[in-house]
Amino acid sequence: MTIPGLMQRTPLTLDMVFDRLSTVYADGRIADVEGETTYGDFSRRVLRLARALTDELGVRPGDRVATFGFNSIRHLELYYAVPLLGAVLHTVNVRLFDDQIAYIVDHAQDTVLFVDGELVESLARVAPRLPSVERYVRMGAGPDDLPGLLDHDELVAAHEPAHDLPPLDEDAAFGLCYTSGTTGNPKGVLYSHRAMVLHSFAACMADHIGLREADVVLPVVPMFHAFAWGLPYAAPLTGAELVFHGSDSSPEHLGRVIDDHGVTLTAGVPTIWKSLLPDLQSGELAAEALRLVFVGGAASPRALIEAYDELGIEYLQVWGMTETGPLACASRPRRRHRGLDREQLLDVRERTGTIFAGLEARVTDTAGRALPRDGASVGELEVSGPWIASAYYGVDAADRFNDGWLKTGDMAYMEADGEFRIVDRAKDLVKSGGEWISSVELEGHLLAHPDIADAAVVGVPSRRWDERPVAVIVPRDGQAPPTLEEVRAFLADRVAKWWLPDAVDVVDEIPKTSVGKLDKKVMRASLDLILD
Ligand code: ADP
């Protein structure tokens, strides 16, 4: 019922962002490895693509359209064309195993699949196991070996712009994204238009991420990982320009993209910023325009935050999950931190931060009761709000929710003013003699060791203590790896004695997941060790 005299009730849907980028910011640039366009020209191609999707590919509201691609302008066209016609955009992680790809495409019942030219061959291998897919479309040049393959650009060229798109419901499904399965099978999260719009506004707030028209934004986070953290929507909402780097995430290529396009703001997992550091420190990469690097997906080691500080580039730690929009928290110092010295401020920024306005967070005990916000009581972090999942798509996972709150699987403690720190993922905490040890904290200290280039800590079974920590380390180039005694001596005045690792495993490379996080499942399996 409408109350007379009440303000307008405009639905919060994607066309709010699309109309703005196509009119107010029509002159804004978008670039990828193939070339450049403007938001104005981009919006006309989106409308042609929307027409092709309905008229030629038979896509109807509610249908799932999958993408299998890296970051590019064509991929961005689908980010808009698919939800604008009421269909659901499903971004498939291209680095999953064939079995996982077959599983999620079947689970989502995708009917059309857009694939990057350079990924056609790898998709062709799994295509016979994707019975729901009726049509394949290739984005860019590449081989033809998929049944009935169409070409993205030809589709766009062959159709008139769709100026008669259906009105959208803010509570309609907008996009589908599966968790990357770091700790289990991929589970689908179904985003609504309303959630996406509110998430975009929230990301733009100055103390959250803080985007503006003058920014040139490079999402290094892949477009198949939680919608590139929402940047393809949040950036155009402010008029910020977008740059896409394609499939090459090497520091050389990213460095070139940052310098060539005058990137001011970029985002990705800590591993990426670690890999760019040597070129930034040597001056090889000037990154003169770069003002903000925001980093999530895993905790950021203090040494990394400090290294960016020394370069004069702001390093902002953020927290989120596929299930949380995904951005939900940023670690910006608060009013009460004014006057702290450099080291103390680093302590603050190393914490996870404060939940975004619009969302709520709490920490609960194993019975699901809220714990005090006393800066000490550790429990499971739970979150709720308009861009938090209320269930998983098509699976019963009631145990992941507590009275409407999403259980994050992250263990944290919270201060009275809501600032919180994640100590570890529940599954990665090392449970030793009835107490827990934070693998994240140990990793942070190990990375400060001059002879250690990369490190991870995993719990391995122990006859006496249930589990004990083992440090998996990569020595710095040309350095002899530190021995167990040296590692323990280095950590001795940083952590409690019973936290010190029981063994050191020296490796050439730390295994990483499909989205660049430490792959502890693989490390635990390959250690295959039982300690006393
Ligand atoms: P997956 O669950 O498959 O890894 P997500 O990308 O959704 O996929 O991962 C979300 C998880 O990443 C969080 O639950 C948390 O454990 C971790 N994470 C994200 N940001 C941070 C952060 N700033 N500090 C610590 N952990 C983080």
Image (spheres, rainbow, N blue to C red):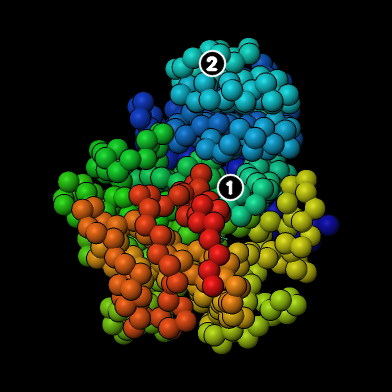
Q: Which residue is the site of mark 1?
A: 180
Counting from the top left corner in percent of width and height, residue 236 is at 46, 44
Counting from the top left corner in percent of width and height, residue 228 is at 50, 46
Residue type at mark 1: give it: Ser
301 to 512, vertically: above or below: below
Res 43 visible? no
Badge number at residue 151: 2
Identify the residue at horizontal 68%, vertical 65% (top origin). Answer: 407
Q: Is residue 113 left or right of residue 166?
A: left
Identify the residue at horizontal 61%, vertical 55% (top origin). Answer: 183
Q: Is residue 356 left or right of residue 3?
A: left
Badge number at residue 432: none
- Residue count near mark 2 (Cα–Cα under 10 Å), binned few <14, some 14–19, many ≥20: some
Residue 338 figure quarter = bottom left
Residue type at mark 2: give it: Asp
345 to 524, vertically: above or below: below
- The quarter in which the C terminus is drawn is bottom right
- Cβ of disc 1 within 8 Å of ligand 1? yes
Question: Which of 262/101 is in front?
Answer: 101
Q: Is residue 218 left or right of residue 477?
A: right
Identify the residue at horizontal 64%, vertical 23% (top origin). Answer: 127
Question: Which of 171/308 is in front?
Answer: 308
Q: Is residue 144 left or right of residue 292?
A: right
Residue 479 figure quarter = bottom left
Name which of mark 1 and mark 2 comes first in the sequence: 2
- Cβ of disc 2 within 8 Å of ligand 1? no
SS for tag 1? loop
Q: Which residue lies most toward the front here?
A: 532
